[in-house]
Amino acid sequence: MTNKYTIGAFALSAFTLAFNQAVYAQEDQAGLEEVVVTGIRQSLQAAADIKRNESRIVDVIAAEDIGKLPDNNIAEALQRITGVSIDSDFGVGESVSIRGLSENRVELNGRSTMGDDRDGVSLDDFPSSFLKTVEVIKSPTADMIEGALGGTVSMKTVRPLELKGLTAAGALDFEYADKTEHWAPIFNGSVGNNWDLDDAGTFGAIVMFSYQDRELRQDEYFNRVKLYDEAAGGAGAQGEGNTASGRYVVRDQNTVEQFVEKRERTATNLTLQWAPASEAGNFYLDLAQTERAGSQAGVSILDVGGSRVYNDNTTQDAGGQVNNYALSGAFVIPKTKTEFRETESSTYAFGGEWHFTDNVMVSGEYAVGKSDSTEPATELNLRPISRDQYLLDGSASTYTSDVTISQSAGKIPSIVYADPNILTNPDNLAIRQFFHDDVTTTNDETAYRLDVEITEAFGFDWLASVKAGFRVTEGQYNYDQSRFRADNLHQDAFELDTDGNATSTRRIVWIDDFEAMYPGSIRTVSYNNAFNQTGLSGQNDLLTYRIYDPAIIHDAEAAFVKIQDMVDGTTKEITGSLADNLARQTGAYRDISEDTTAMYLTADLDFDALRATAGVRYVKTEVASTVYSADDELVTGTHEYSDVLPSLNVTYDLQEGTMLRFAAAKVMRRPDYTDLSSAFDIDNSIVTADRGALTLDPHRATQFDLSLEHYFGDANMVSAAVFYKDVQSFLDSSTVCVASPLTVSTPQNVFEYQNVCLLDTAGVDNPDIEYATTAQGMSYVEAQRDAGLTGIRTSQTTNGNNGKVQGIELGYQHMFDFLPGAWSGLGVGANYTYADSENPNGNTLLLISKNTINTQVYWEYEDFQVRLAYNFRDKFLSTEEEKRVETVGILGLDSSTNDEESASYDRTAGNNYRDDRGQLDFSASWDVNDSVTLAASVSNLLGEPSSFSTELGSKWMYTEADRRFTFGVRAKF
């Protein structure tokens, strides 16, 4: 398949190269062709050998490829494999979907890695430079750990006894991000050796270290989208909208978010290994740790409210979306926010294998995986309050302005306010609220494994081996949250008299007052390269604003002290430190223990041209979930289930170099921990929440694969594969407006009143999501809240029905080494994936494109290497029930009801699609000598942004991040 040309995309540091030269020379004894790594071709051949000799359907990335492309990130390398797509944040890949399914496993040397949930370590948290190979296993065998619905990402490091002697290497790169205009270092270093201790055997050690500093920015623009049954000026009369219902598609709540992420990643890996002089086995100790630290801070600038005003120049597109119109009486909400996950993740393992006889081997391992994360989140927000009106009557009157919206050629819309200074004039911007959350997540697993393998078992020539074993795990997951809120500071802070009683004098602090009190706290932000990839339709007043400085918001304690000082002597005064004021959110607390017991039996069959691996795995899962009850008491529930997972992998040699593979298996994936708890995960405003259930069944699937592979030349290949997955017990979600006393007691923030769901009866959930109209306004919603008639829009996870994904994968790789001279350095690779999927609700699966294309062209001759790689994915469903577009569906009904019997029901309402997107990457290197290489690369060379659309094709969100330029030197000794 595509791994051969994907390998070329995996930009790994040169020190791994030095280790792996020794590795593959020794692996020749295991049936692989000896490879002396000198460049792209040899690395492609090494990976082709691994794939060709595998009993499973596997794609491989080999670390011998020395960083020719900017894929120093594991996920970004894997996206070039057929059937693999990635999820990115700030333009950096962090996780993968395999054949449209994101429920996968990430393993390190065959054991679990740990992150904040089931998926294992985030792929941008683990250094690619530590790895020998990365395999994507699409057809499992019974001895593999269960839990992957799409496939398993198996990362493997070099073992000390694979080295030929003392090896040391290092790499120093500098990465430039063009939005932040920031240079940052990336360093990788390692040293390894092994020693012959005569009769005491052989001992080896490898130590690796990696450090990465990075500063990136992400720009996002998005709207809320609604449908209206009304006349729309020049666009047409009532009922003439280009939608099935005749309604018009209108955007409001114009929003710009610009965040800067500063991230440091430090990682270490130590491996010790010993083998006796008899070479009967070996024992090892693996210690790996990664630490992610930094901050992510920025702003969210949006407007709310306003009555729609159309004119003769108002138009509509083919999907009914109007252009050139105004919102009368909108007001802005500037927010400064920070939220960043700091994580320490580690795996420790002691194990070994021993040949008791020539054909009996026993292996075992004790492994501990840990992940500890903290995720502080802080907001300091402003409110548009008129100082002039306050001076007249002491009121906290909201300052509004009309805004005109127009767009051209798919660029960011032009947003022009009647008052161009609405976001910079200190007379209209006051301090409104301060929020802080502390979230801690721990996820630990202890695993015990024992395996026995018997080769040439029972005297049958065709029975190559029998393997059996068991694995026991003890897992513990804990999520805890504390919160502090100082709300409505512009409205509810009244001066106290000398006796401590409230007066009628309201204290409002405008941003110039705040700046005078705390110099350096307020600044004007206006990036000269904002949305330079998408382009602007014209003037956009959301891009210049005065705000609490995003660069200092991550210091929550300092921000708290300023707010504390600001409200001192008022009815909102605060005593104590920030820590003293944090209130534990018992409703969000969840503590989950999970114990598993697995046993398996597998057999390798060899009939010369036909080989097969057949087996069965049995696994039992016991879960206990502890949450706080409505009475604030800890209560524990339990759930258990078991699975029988048969698997079969067959390979048939049609002729030399041509093989046909067939695989079938049952697989399962346990629900994420966040889905296994009935605890509320509520946002800061008490407006939205997520909720799970302990009794959820796991995802289960039956899958079939058929592939044809033909190898020719040294590492040339053409392949074709078809696959089918039938997924049972899909997890689904339903959205309900949940009645909660928190809406009154906290109280709920209704400033963005159009996003607050309404109840029909106080204390009773509303299965339909209903909102106030613009005409009713915020005062109406405030009154409803105070009467207990607003709820929390809650997404509830449930077990759904069956779904499927099926498709084809085509791959081609060719090295033109038969050409004369420098032309012999040319090579190409291409792959294509077609995937057809269906969810129980009739939608496609999330994150899966119907058509994905990868191409690579490279040239490697003597000491020079150049490579271009292009990845294209067409439109795919990114999220369902997306809040900002939740009423927009193919029927154009402006409804988000979940009642399938209702005339307003539209199953596509809330679908959010990421549009077609391609990305071109470039890399080049020069081997100065046998030890030193200079390298350069560019990620997203053409600066391609991403855009998102509704079911009706209306674009509602645009996002873009830095292009990344890397220059460095690498050396090996």
Image (tube, grey):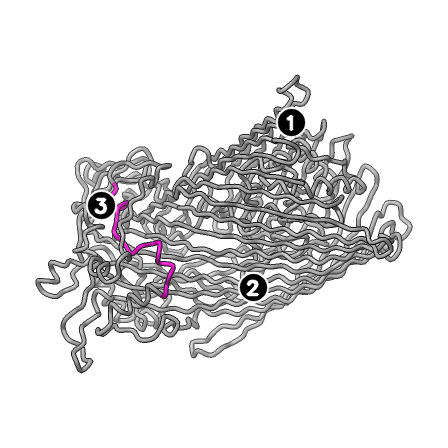
Please determine whether, in this image, residue 528 is positioned above or below residue 819.
Answer: below
Mark 2 and 3 residues: CB-CB less than 8 Å, in contact? no
Q: What residue is rendered at 39% in x and 46% in y?
A: 218
Disc nearest the viewer among 1 and 3: 1
Amino acid at dot 1: His
Disc on res. 443: 2
Tell whether position 550 is magenta: yes
Secondary structure of the residue carrying tag 3 is loop
Q: Residue at x 48, y 64 (%)?
A: 692
Q: Which residues fall within the magenta stretch?
A: 540-557
- Percent position of residue 809, x then y: 60, 36
Q: Nearer the viewer, residue 697 or 345?
A: 345
Name of the residue lying farthest toward the top: 820
Q: Answer with left or right where residue 502 lies relative to residue 655.
A: left
Residue occupied by mark 1: 814
Q: Report helix, strand or loop for mark 1.
A: strand
Q: Residues within 10 Å of mark 3 (few under 14, many from 20)?
A: some
- Above or below, comparing residue 732 to residue 494 in the picture: above
Is residue 283 at least partly visible in the picture?
A: yes
Q: Position of residue 423 (x, y in %)?
A: 22, 50
Residue 690 placement: quadrant: bottom left
Mark 3: amino acid = Glu
Instruction: Return the x and y of residue 446 as percentages of the image width and height.
Output: 65, 65
The answer to whether 41 appears left or right of 338 in the picture is right
Q: Which mark is residue 230?
A: 3
- 729 shown above or below 1: below
Q: Earlier in the sequence, mark 2 or mark 3?
A: 3
Closer to the camera in the image, 720 or 87? 87
Mark 1–mark 3 Cα distance, whole angstroms, equals 60 Å
